[in-house]
Amino acid sequence: MASRASRWLPESASLTQAVMIVALCAALNVLGGFTAKTLAIPIVYLDTVGTFVAAVLLGPWWGAAAGVTYNTTASLTFDPGTWPFAIVSVVVALLWGYGIRRFALGRSPIAFFALGVVVAVVSAIVASPIVLFVFGGATGSASDAITFAAQLAGLGQGPAVFLSNIESNLADKLLAGSLGLALVRALPGTTAAGVRLPATSRFGTLAMTSGGIAIGVVLALVAIALPHG
């Protein structure tokens, strides 16, 4: 089993190291998700930063393992409604992992942020039916306010849920990707050997991370403000 699993690992990591990284990344997701849930932070979920890190360092399926581990842990502890979104965690990990590691979509800031937008849109497409058919259109998160406001403005439930998911995922995934990039860059250079990432200088990493966080925050504020305008 170890030899079979090793075929899915980068040359710089052993199976033991991979399991430890996945566990740490899942814990990072738990920390972010618990913080966002406890503080009722609007729009963003902060529960995929670890998924990004694992997908970039180890590969897409290891990132999926970190994401699903988070969903399982959260559903058994502080957020029972998290488990149906495990499929979203898998999709996010595959897009980030394959996008950056195989297709080099992290080679420049423009490509990196474009991939973040793709991740956000696909996440919204996958999550919206879950919100509609599993939770009846509302999950109890702060982003439900956008859904309700959009319905009051005349949108049907389906379009309102999709609008809410698009707005929240754009802010959340750009934040997660930027924070994840900063964490990966903070690790020893050999950890992400062979992975093409933008902003190789410390100043460039700081500027890009700050820019991504700023964009995510602005999108979150716009998402909060627009439905009430």
Image (cartoon, rainbow, N blue to C red):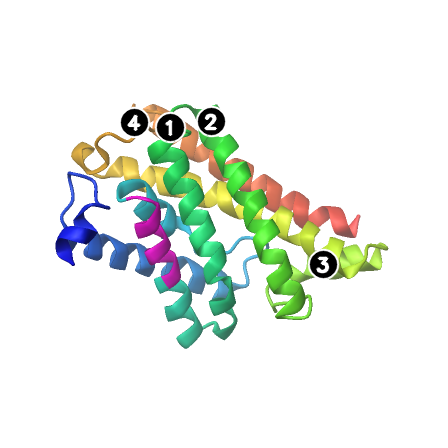
| Image position, residue 201 (x, y; %) | 29, 23
138 sits left or right of 27 in the view: right
Q: Earlier in the sequence, mark 3 or mark 4?
A: 3
Q: Earlier in the sequence, mark 4 or mark 1?
A: 1
What is the CA distance from the residue labelled 3 to the residue labelled 4? Answer: 40 Å
Which residue carries the number 3 mark?
Answer: 147
Numbered badge on residue 104: 1
Magenta stretch: residue 107 in it?
no
Which-is-in-front pick, marks 3 and 1? 1
Q: Determine the secondary structure under disc 4.
A: helix
Amino acid beneath label 1: Ala
Numbered badge on residue 111: 2
| Image position, residue 224 (x, y; %) | 67, 50
Numbered badge on residue 88: none
Amino acid beneath label 3: Thr
CB under 8 Å between discs 4 and 2: no
Q: Is residue 170 above or below residue 146?
A: above
Q: Which residue is nearer to you in this view: 19 or 200?
A: 19
Give the quarter of the figure containing the N terminus.
bottom left
Which-is-in-front pick, marks 4 and 2? 2
Which-is-in-front pick, marks 1 and 2? 1
Question: Dividing the picture into quarters, in which one does residue 70 lie?
Answer: bottom left
Q: Give the magenta range.
A: 59-68
Q: Earlier in the sequence, mark 2 or mark 3?
A: 2
Which residue carries the number 4 mark?
Answer: 202
Q: Residues within 10 Å of mark 3 (few under 14, many from 20)?
A: many
Q: Which residue is nearer to you in this view: 4 or 20?
A: 4
Which-is-in-front pick, marks 3 and 4? 3
